Amino acid sequence: MIRVLKTSFHASSEDLDRLFTCNRISAHVWNDCLHFAKSHFLEHGEWIDKTQLQKATKGKYPIHSQSIQAVCHKYLHARDNAHKAKQKGHSHIRYPYKTKKHFPTKWAAQGFTVHDNGRIELSPGIYQCKRQKPIVVWVKRVPNGVIKEIELIYDRGLQLAISYDDGIQPAMAKGTRIAAVDPGEIHSVACVTEDGEALIVTGRKLRSVKRLRNKKMKELRRKMAKCTRGSRQWRKYRRALHYVLSKSERQLQQEVVVGDVEGVQRNRSNKKRRRIGKRVRSRKHNQRMSQWQFGKQYEYMKYKLHAHGIAIAKQDERNTTQTCPVCTCKRKPSGRIYRCSCGYIQHRDIHGGCNILSVYKYGEIKPMMTQIQRIKYLRIA
Ligand SMILES: [Zn+2]
């Protein structure tokens, strides 16, 4: 299985500078991709393809040719994902358009050498017929297995994301049961199986971390608004903001998965929603929604379940929280218990999970064949 190790590293100050430069160059490549794609479209009336984009960028930057290619691929990936989302009816999603100042640099198999003692040489490739000397970094631990690629990312300082194949085959699943998982907010995840077992994983701690972060960030943003943009004080606040953000990120995810979840912007600003006459959600609601981080959670679950040979499918959860499975009337649950006038009563999250399971199995919301036997609770610190 492909796994990712995210790690800090040591390097000489000269090589650190060169690494920062790498990410600036990668951003340059990204910005050029935007530009090439646009002018190609204006000239030919069609989208630039992989070969054309690679030809346009090849050999023009002082980083490894595979690192340049990686940026091109990311651009194409982001563009195609936006296209897919548009086709699905998410008309507000934009094609990649934002220029960047920094962009992660990726080294593929031919671009690096890893030594057992933690020394890693990253190749900046050949530029203007000259092979440039490698950038040397030191990591504490080299992962066991075949290293596939190394990415230089920025998260409260530069870090390496090392993807490797641990050589372990994912297990074969033993059972054939189906379970529904309802990602909620207070109880982070509720899980219900066909034969009436239920598990609730609570994430109250996580929520409190998020709340605290939001509070701190709001205050810092307010302070920043009072300063001149770019001034010393402003920069100081901005640094603090980044610090708070990355620190809580760390508290929220013990392990990091770098999946191919290229960012498509989901939410549009309230201003824009208002202009086009859409309902404006309250700030509180938005804050909650965005923090569900459903995409992240899903990718993470998929990755974790895969190791145990369990497949995962998405199920439209529309109406599942509101509909009573017995009399099919709809009501908004308030509090943690769903109570219907017909006498049906259930824990809110279990109720949602059962309904999702039912829609998945029968295509409609029906009462469960078996009663929920027992609910197990799991608290994450
Ligand atoms: Zn009812």
Image (cartoon, rainbow, N blue to C red):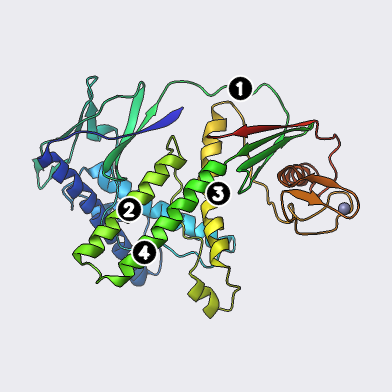
Location of mark 3 (residue): 294
- Give the alpha-carbon distance from disc 2 to disc 4, as whole Å: 11 Å
- Give the alpha-carbon distance from disc 3 to disc 2, as whole Å: 22 Å
Tags 1 and 2 touching, CB below 8 Å: no
Query: Which one is in front in this view, the residue at disc 1 or the one at disc 2?
Result: 2
Going by the numbered disc 4, the residue's amino acid type is Arg
Q: Which element carries disc 3, helix, strand or loop?
A: helix
Q: Is residue 258 visible?
A: no
Could you tell me which residue is drawn at 9 percent across and 44 percent down? 129
Query: Which one is in front in this view, the residue at disc 3 or the one at disc 2?
Result: 2
Compare marks 1 and 2 and give the one earlier in the sequence. Answer: 1
The label number, if any, that marks residue 242 in the structure image: 2
Location of mark 1 (residue): 172
- Give the alpha-carbon distance from disc 3 to disc 4, as whole Å: 25 Å
Compare marks 3 and 4 and give the one earlier in the sequence. Answer: 4
Location of mark 4 (residue): 221
Neighbours of disc 3 within 10 Å: few (<14), some (14-19), many (20+): few
Going by the numbered disc 2, the residue's amino acid type is His
Could you tell me which residue is drawn at 22 percent across and 67 percent down? 230
Going by the numbered disc 3, the residue's amino acid type is Phe
The image position of residue 380, as x and y in percent, is: 55, 35
Q: Is mark 1 within 8 Å of ligand 1?
A: no
Going by the numbered disc 1, the residue's amino acid type is Met
- Give the alpha-carbon distance from disc 1 to disc 2, as whole Å: 42 Å
Q: Is residue 219 visible?
A: yes
Q: Residue 257 appears in which quarter of the rendering? A: top left
The image position of residue 144, as x and y in percent, is: 35, 21
Tags 1 and 4 touching, CB below 8 Å: no
Relative to 173, residue 352 above or below:
below
